[in-house]
Amino acid sequence: ASNEQRVYHKIAIYLGTALGGLTLTGSLVAFTKLQGEIFGIKFSGQPLRFPCLGFINACMGLSLAGGMVPFLMAPHHVHFVRYLVANAAVSSMLGYTITAGIGGADMPVAVTVLNSYSGWAMAADGVLLQNNLLIIV
């Protein structure tokens, strides 16, 4: 594979991981809010509110965007994996904080958006695997 193809593959891996982490934790939070109770523990449909939540979400989003640069320039697979794990952790936290900040009545809209994110993650995997079916579906 040429160097250009390697860069495209790394971008697809990074974006697929970011969208996958965000979708996974966001979907779990949405399910929990809609269910109201899991394993005997009651959950409120109220949105999570605390100071600077929007700022924290913006910082996590910017760190994901900025983290792509060192990920693409990683000289060795050990560094490559470290950046990918950090990406997965930050995107998972972002999925939690974004979805937890949405009230229970708006959760169907959030679920629709999260389903869209999973489609984009699948398309990124299709690019990585050079599988047109994953890109089209």
Image (cartoon, rainbow, N blue to C red):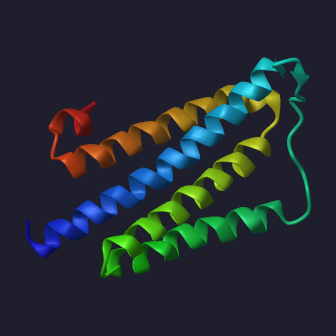
The quadrant of the rendering that contains the C terminus is top left
**Quarter of the image where one finds residue 30:** top right
Residue 88 position (above or below residue 2): above
The quadrant of the rendering that contains the N terminus is bottom left
10 left or right, relative to 46:
left
Task: Name the foreground residue: 40 vs 58.
Answer: 40
Relative image position of residue 128 (x, y in whole percent): 23, 51
Residue 66 position (above or below residue 18): below
Residue 5 position (above or below residue 49): below
Relative image position of residue 135 (x, y in whole percent): 25, 40
Q: Could you tell me which residue is drawn at 81 percent across and 60 percent down?
A: 53
Q: Could you tell me which residue is drawn at 89 percent across and 35 percent down?
A: 46
**Quarter of the image where one finds residue 102:** top right
Q: Could you tell me which residue is drawn at 77 percent across and 68 percent down?
A: 55
Residue 117 position (above or below residue 107): below
Relative image position of residue 40 (x, y in whole percent): 88, 17
Q: Which residue lies furthest to the front in this view?
A: 78
